[in-house]
Image (cartoon, rainbow, N blue to C red):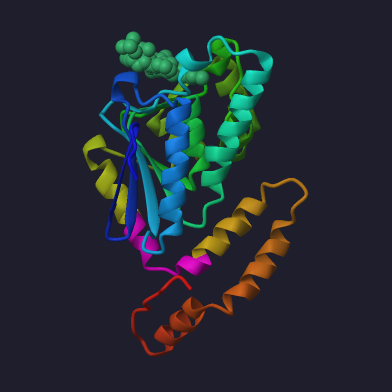
Amino acid sequence: MNFENIIVSSENGIGQITINRPSKLNALNVATIRELHDAFQSLDENNETRVIIIIGEGEKAFVAGADISEFANYSIEEGAQLSQQGQELLFDFVENLKTPVIAAINGFALGGGLELAMSCHFRVASDNAKMGLPEVSLGVIPGYGGTQRLPQLVGKGRAMELIMTAGMIDAETAKNYGLVNHVVLQAELLEFTKSIATKIMRNSPAAIGKAIKAINDNYKDGVDGYKTEIKNFGKCFGTEDFKEGTTAFIEKRKAIFQGK
Ligand code: COA
Protein backbone atom coordinates (compact mmCIF):
# COMPACT_ATOMS: atom_id res chain seq x y z
CA MET A 1 0.00 0.00 0.00
CA ASN A 2 1.17 3.52 -0.79
CA PHE A 3 0.59 6.18 1.79
CA GLU A 4 1.27 9.92 1.73
CA ASN A 5 0.93 10.76 5.41
CA ILE A 6 2.08 7.64 7.23
CA ILE A 7 4.88 5.10 7.03
CA VAL A 8 4.08 1.44 7.65
CA SER A 9 6.67 -1.23 8.30
CA SER A 10 6.71 -4.74 9.70
CA GLU A 11 9.52 -6.66 11.32
CA ASN A 12 9.57 -9.83 13.43
CA GLY A 13 5.82 -9.77 14.03
CA ILE A 14 5.70 -6.10 15.05
CA GLY A 15 3.85 -3.74 12.75
CA GLN A 16 4.85 -0.10 13.08
CA ILE A 17 2.81 2.86 11.91
CA THR A 18 4.55 6.24 11.92
CA ILE A 19 2.44 9.33 11.38
CA ASN A 20 4.55 11.38 9.02
CA ARG A 21 3.52 15.03 8.83
CA PRO A 22 6.22 16.48 11.10
CA SER A 23 5.96 19.99 9.61
CA LYS A 24 2.35 20.06 10.96
CA LEU A 25 3.32 18.24 14.17
CA ASN A 26 1.63 15.15 12.67
CA ALA A 27 -1.83 16.77 12.88
CA LEU A 28 -4.61 14.41 11.82
CA ASN A 29 -6.31 15.55 8.64
CA VAL A 30 -9.07 13.46 7.08
CA ALA A 31 -6.67 11.90 4.55
CA THR A 32 -4.38 10.74 7.36
CA ILE A 33 -7.32 9.26 9.27
CA ARG A 34 -8.30 7.24 6.18
CA GLU A 35 -4.74 6.06 5.65
CA LEU A 36 -4.49 5.05 9.29
CA HIS A 37 -7.71 3.07 8.99
CA ASP A 38 -6.37 1.18 5.96
CA ALA A 39 -3.00 0.52 7.59
CA PHE A 40 -4.50 -0.74 10.86
CA GLN A 41 -6.95 -2.93 8.96
CA SER A 42 -4.28 -4.51 6.80
CA LEU A 43 -1.89 -5.13 9.72
CA ASP A 44 -4.72 -6.59 11.83
CA GLU A 45 -5.76 -8.94 9.01
CA ASN A 46 -2.20 -10.19 8.58
CA ASN A 47 -1.73 -13.16 10.92
CA GLU A 48 2.00 -12.53 11.08
CA THR A 49 1.43 -9.20 12.84
CA ARG A 50 1.30 -9.92 16.56
CA VAL A 51 1.51 -6.35 17.92
CA ILE A 52 1.08 -2.91 16.34
CA ILE A 53 3.01 0.16 17.57
CA ILE A 54 1.97 3.67 16.55
CA ILE A 55 4.32 6.66 16.91
CA GLY A 56 4.78 10.14 15.42
CA GLU A 57 7.66 11.15 13.14
CA GLY A 58 10.25 13.47 14.66
CA GLU A 59 11.15 14.32 18.22
CA LYS A 60 8.50 16.91 18.89
CA ALA A 61 5.07 15.39 18.45
CA PHE A 62 3.09 12.18 18.51
CA VAL A 63 0.10 14.08 17.08
CA ALA A 64 -0.73 17.72 17.92
CA GLY A 65 -4.43 17.23 17.30
CA ALA A 66 -6.96 17.13 14.53
CA ASP A 67 -5.96 19.43 11.67
CA ILE A 68 -7.51 22.73 12.74
CA SER A 69 -7.08 24.31 9.29
CA GLU A 70 -9.39 21.68 7.81
CA PHE A 71 -12.47 22.19 9.98
CA ALA A 72 -12.27 25.91 10.84
CA ASN A 73 -15.21 26.74 8.50
CA TYR A 74 -17.38 23.66 9.05
CA SER A 75 -21.15 23.86 9.65
CA ILE A 76 -22.97 22.06 12.51
CA GLU A 77 -23.72 19.09 10.23
CA GLU A 78 -20.17 18.91 8.89
CA GLY A 79 -18.79 19.04 12.43
CA ALA A 80 -21.00 16.15 13.57
CA GLN A 81 -20.08 14.16 10.47
CA LEU A 82 -16.35 14.76 11.02
CA SER A 83 -16.65 13.41 14.54
CA GLN A 84 -18.80 10.39 13.62
CA GLN A 85 -16.72 9.35 10.62
CA GLY A 86 -13.47 9.76 12.52
CA GLN A 87 -14.74 7.69 15.44
CA GLU A 88 -15.94 4.91 13.15
CA LEU A 89 -12.94 4.85 10.84
CA LEU A 90 -10.17 5.19 13.38
CA PHE A 91 -10.82 5.59 17.08
CA ASP A 92 -13.46 2.89 17.70
CA PHE A 93 -11.84 0.80 15.00
CA VAL A 94 -8.43 0.75 16.73
CA GLU A 95 -9.91 0.11 20.18
CA ASN A 96 -11.72 -2.97 18.88
CA LEU A 97 -8.89 -4.56 16.89
CA LYS A 98 -7.96 -8.10 17.91
CA THR A 99 -4.25 -7.28 17.54
CA PRO A 100 -2.77 -5.38 20.52
CA VAL A 101 -2.02 -1.74 19.68
CA ILE A 102 0.48 0.26 21.76
CA ALA A 103 0.83 4.04 21.44
CA ALA A 104 4.42 5.25 21.78
CA ILE A 105 3.84 8.90 22.68
CA ASN A 106 7.02 10.67 21.59
CA GLY A 107 6.07 14.31 22.24
CA PHE A 108 2.87 16.39 22.08
CA ALA A 109 -0.30 14.26 22.15
CA LEU A 110 -3.03 16.86 22.06
CA GLY A 111 -6.69 16.76 21.13
CA GLY A 112 -7.17 14.09 18.46
CA GLY A 113 -3.61 12.94 19.16
CA LEU A 114 -4.35 12.08 22.76
CA GLU A 115 -7.69 10.63 21.64
CA LEU A 116 -5.83 8.37 19.22
CA ALA A 117 -3.41 7.30 21.94
CA MET A 118 -6.37 6.61 24.26
CA SER A 119 -7.98 4.41 21.59
CA CYS A 120 -4.89 2.22 21.63
CA HIS A 121 -4.87 -0.66 24.11
CA PHE A 122 -2.23 1.03 26.25
CA ARG A 123 0.37 3.78 26.14
CA VAL A 124 4.08 4.36 26.75
CA ALA A 125 5.42 7.94 26.81
CA SER A 126 8.80 9.57 26.33
CA ASP A 127 9.98 11.89 29.08
CA ASN A 128 9.34 15.00 26.93
CA ALA A 129 5.73 14.06 26.15
CA LYS A 130 2.94 16.53 26.86
CA MET A 131 -0.70 15.52 26.83
CA GLY A 132 -3.99 17.36 26.88
CA LEU A 133 -7.38 17.94 25.32
CA PRO A 134 -7.26 21.67 24.48
CA GLU A 135 -10.45 21.69 22.35
CA VAL A 136 -12.46 24.09 24.54
CA SER A 137 -9.74 26.70 23.98
CA LEU A 138 -10.85 26.58 20.32
CA GLY A 139 -14.55 26.73 21.17
CA VAL A 140 -15.20 23.05 20.49
CA ILE A 141 -15.20 19.86 22.58
CA PRO A 142 -13.19 16.66 22.07
CA GLY A 143 -14.93 14.83 19.23
CA TYR A 144 -12.93 11.65 18.77
CA GLY A 145 -14.01 9.92 21.98
CA GLY A 146 -12.02 12.11 24.41
CA THR A 147 -14.93 12.93 26.71
CA GLN A 148 -15.54 9.19 27.15
CA ARG A 149 -12.09 7.58 27.20
CA LEU A 150 -10.29 10.18 29.34
CA PRO A 151 -12.61 9.68 32.36
CA GLN A 152 -12.36 5.91 31.88
CA LEU A 153 -8.59 6.15 32.17
CA VAL A 154 -8.00 8.91 34.74
CA GLY A 155 -11.35 9.28 36.57
CA LYS A 156 -14.13 11.83 36.15
CA GLY A 157 -12.71 14.68 38.24
CA ARG A 158 -9.31 14.71 36.58
CA ALA A 159 -10.91 14.45 33.13
CA MET A 160 -13.26 17.34 33.93
CA GLU A 161 -10.34 19.52 35.04
CA LEU A 162 -8.09 18.64 32.09
CA ILE A 163 -10.85 19.25 29.55
CA MET A 164 -12.18 22.45 31.20
CA THR A 165 -8.75 24.04 31.66
CA ALA A 166 -7.54 22.87 28.21
CA GLY A 167 -4.27 22.31 30.05
CA MET A 168 -1.36 20.01 29.32
CA ILE A 169 0.17 17.46 31.68
CA ASP A 170 3.69 16.10 31.48
CA ALA A 171 4.59 12.44 31.11
CA GLU A 172 5.18 11.80 34.83
CA THR A 173 1.80 13.29 35.76
CA ALA A 174 0.19 11.22 33.01
CA LYS A 175 1.79 8.13 34.56
CA ASN A 176 0.54 9.07 38.02
CA TYR A 177 -2.95 9.51 36.55
CA GLY A 178 -2.81 6.06 34.87
CA LEU A 179 -3.00 7.61 31.42
CA VAL A 180 0.33 6.07 30.37
CA ASN A 181 1.87 2.90 31.75
CA HIS A 182 5.56 3.81 31.46
CA VAL A 183 7.78 6.86 30.93
CA VAL A 184 11.19 6.37 29.31
CA LEU A 185 13.88 8.53 27.71
CA GLN A 186 12.89 9.59 24.22
CA ALA A 187 15.90 7.83 22.67
CA GLU A 188 14.73 4.58 24.27
CA LEU A 189 11.00 4.88 23.58
CA LEU A 190 10.73 2.67 20.52
CA GLU A 191 13.06 -0.07 21.79
CA PHE A 192 11.32 -0.11 25.17
CA THR A 193 7.89 -0.34 23.51
CA LYS A 194 9.16 -3.15 21.28
CA SER A 195 10.41 -5.01 24.36
CA ILE A 196 6.85 -4.99 25.76
CA ALA A 197 5.58 -6.11 22.35
CA THR A 198 8.02 -9.02 22.45
CA LYS A 199 6.61 -10.16 25.80
CA ILE A 200 3.09 -10.01 24.39
CA MET A 201 4.15 -12.01 21.35
CA ARG A 202 5.10 -15.02 23.47
CA ASN A 203 1.42 -15.51 24.29
CA SER A 204 -1.59 -16.82 22.41
CA PRO A 205 -2.90 -14.29 19.84
CA ALA A 206 -6.26 -16.08 19.85
CA ALA A 207 -6.57 -15.64 23.62
CA ILE A 208 -5.29 -12.04 23.57
CA GLY A 209 -7.89 -11.04 20.97
CA LYS A 210 -10.65 -12.52 23.13
CA ALA A 211 -9.29 -10.80 26.25
CA ILE A 212 -9.29 -7.43 24.46
CA LYS A 213 -12.96 -7.89 23.57
CA ALA A 214 -13.92 -8.91 27.12
CA ILE A 215 -12.08 -5.93 28.64
CA ASN A 216 -13.60 -3.50 26.14
CA ASP A 217 -17.09 -4.82 26.82
CA ASN A 218 -16.77 -3.59 30.42
CA TYR A 219 -17.03 -0.06 29.00
CA LYS A 220 -19.92 -0.59 26.59
CA ASP A 221 -23.42 0.50 27.50
CA GLY A 222 -25.90 -2.34 27.70
CA VAL A 223 -23.23 -5.02 27.29
CA ASP A 224 -22.37 -7.37 30.15
CA GLY A 225 -18.60 -7.83 30.10
CA TYR A 226 -18.83 -10.77 32.51
CA LYS A 227 -21.00 -12.59 29.95
CA THR A 228 -18.47 -11.83 27.22
CA GLU A 229 -15.75 -13.20 29.49
CA ILE A 230 -17.68 -16.44 30.06
CA LYS A 231 -18.39 -16.86 26.33
CA ASN A 232 -14.83 -16.06 25.25
CA PHE A 233 -13.31 -18.18 28.02
CA GLY A 234 -15.33 -21.10 26.64
CA LYS A 235 -14.32 -20.32 23.05
CA CYS A 236 -10.63 -20.57 23.99
CA PHE A 237 -11.13 -24.29 24.69
CA GLY A 238 -11.83 -24.80 20.99
CA THR A 239 -8.63 -23.15 19.77
CA GLU A 240 -5.38 -24.75 18.61
CA ASP A 241 -3.55 -22.17 20.75
CA PHE A 242 -5.17 -23.61 23.89
CA LYS A 243 -4.13 -27.14 22.93
CA GLU A 244 -0.60 -25.94 22.21
CA GLY A 245 -0.37 -23.84 25.40
CA THR A 246 -1.51 -26.59 27.74
CA THR A 247 0.46 -29.32 25.94
CA ALA A 248 3.64 -27.24 25.99
CA PHE A 249 3.21 -26.62 29.72
CA ILE A 250 2.83 -30.34 30.44
CA GLU A 251 5.77 -31.20 28.17
CA LYS A 252 7.85 -28.47 29.87
CA ARG A 253 8.63 -26.66 26.63
CA LYS A 254 7.92 -23.22 25.19
CA ALA A 255 4.59 -22.92 23.42
CA ILE A 256 4.57 -22.00 19.74
CA PHE A 257 1.27 -20.29 19.06
CA GLN A 258 -0.26 -19.97 15.59
CA GLY A 259 -3.09 -17.66 16.62
CA LYS A 260 -5.76 -20.20 15.66
N1 COA B 1 -3.71 21.47 13.24
C1 COA B 1 -3.10 22.03 12.19
N2 COA B 1 -1.84 22.46 12.20
C2 COA B 1 -1.15 22.32 13.34
C3 COA B 1 -1.72 21.73 14.50
C4 COA B 1 -3.06 21.30 14.42
N3 COA B 1 -3.68 20.71 15.44
N4 COA B 1 -0.81 21.74 15.49
C5 COA B 1 0.31 22.28 14.99
N5 COA B 1 0.09 22.64 13.68
C6 COA B 1 1.05 23.27 12.76
C7 COA B 1 1.21 24.76 13.03
O1 COA B 1 0.17 25.49 12.43
C8 COA B 1 2.54 25.02 12.41
O2 COA B 1 2.40 25.07 11.00
P1 COA B 1 3.11 26.27 10.15
O3 COA B 1 4.59 26.08 10.40
O4 COA B 1 2.71 25.98 8.75
O5 COA B 1 2.59 27.53 10.71
C9 COA B 1 3.33 23.74 12.71
O6 COA B 1 2.35 22.75 12.96
C10 COA B 1 4.24 23.84 13.92
O7 COA B 1 3.45 24.24 15.03
P2 COA B 1 3.79 25.52 15.95
O8 COA B 1 2.51 25.98 16.57
O9 COA B 1 4.57 26.53 15.18
O10 COA B 1 4.73 24.84 17.04
P3 COA B 1 5.00 25.36 18.53
O11 COA B 1 6.16 24.59 19.03
O12 COA B 1 5.05 26.83 18.59
O13 COA B 1 3.68 24.92 19.36
C11 COA B 1 1.89 23.41 19.99
C12 COA B 1 3.36 23.55 19.52
C13 COA B 1 1.54 21.93 20.00
C14 COA B 1 1.73 24.00 21.40
C15 COA B 1 0.97 24.19 19.02
O14 COA B 1 1.27 23.76 17.70
C16 COA B 1 -0.51 23.97 19.24
O15 COA B 1 -1.08 24.52 20.17
N6 COA B 1 -1.16 23.21 18.33
C17 COA B 1 -2.59 22.99 18.38
C18 COA B 1 -2.97 22.04 19.48
C19 COA B 1 -4.46 21.87 19.56
O16 COA B 1 -5.19 22.76 19.89
N7 COA B 1 -4.93 20.65 19.21
C20 COA B 1 -6.31 20.30 19.30
C21 COA B 1 -6.95 20.40 17.98
S1 COA B 1 -8.66 20.00 18.08
User: From the viewer's perspective, is 10 left or right of 47?
Assistant: left
Residue 194 drawn at (x, y percent): 30, 52
- Please report the residue visible at 50 percent of the width from the left and 63 percent of the height from the top: 208
In the image, ligand 1 is in what quadrant? Answer: top left
Point 57% across, 63% down: residue:
210
From what the image shows, is residue 130 above or below residue 118? above
Q: Residue at horizontal 27%, vertical 60%?
A: 12
Q: Check residue 36 for magenta coloring.
A: no
- Magenta: main secondary structure: helix
Q: Quadrant of the N terminus?
A: top left
Q: Is residue 149 left or right of residue 114?
A: right
Q: Is residue 72 above or below residue 174?
A: above
Q: Nearer the viewer, residue 47 or 210?
A: 47
Q: Is residue 1 left or right of residue 111?
A: left
| Residue 203 falls within the magenta-colored stretch | yes
- Provide the residue span drawn in magenta: 197-207
Residue 171 percent location from the top left of the image:
39, 32
Q: Measured from the top left, where is residue 98 in percent x and y?
A: 51, 57
**Please, is residue 227 above or below residue 222 in the view?**
below
Viewer-nearest residue: 182 or 142: 142
Residue 53, given in percent of the width and then of the height, sits at: 37, 47
**Above or below 251: residue 80:** above
Residue furthest left in the image: 187
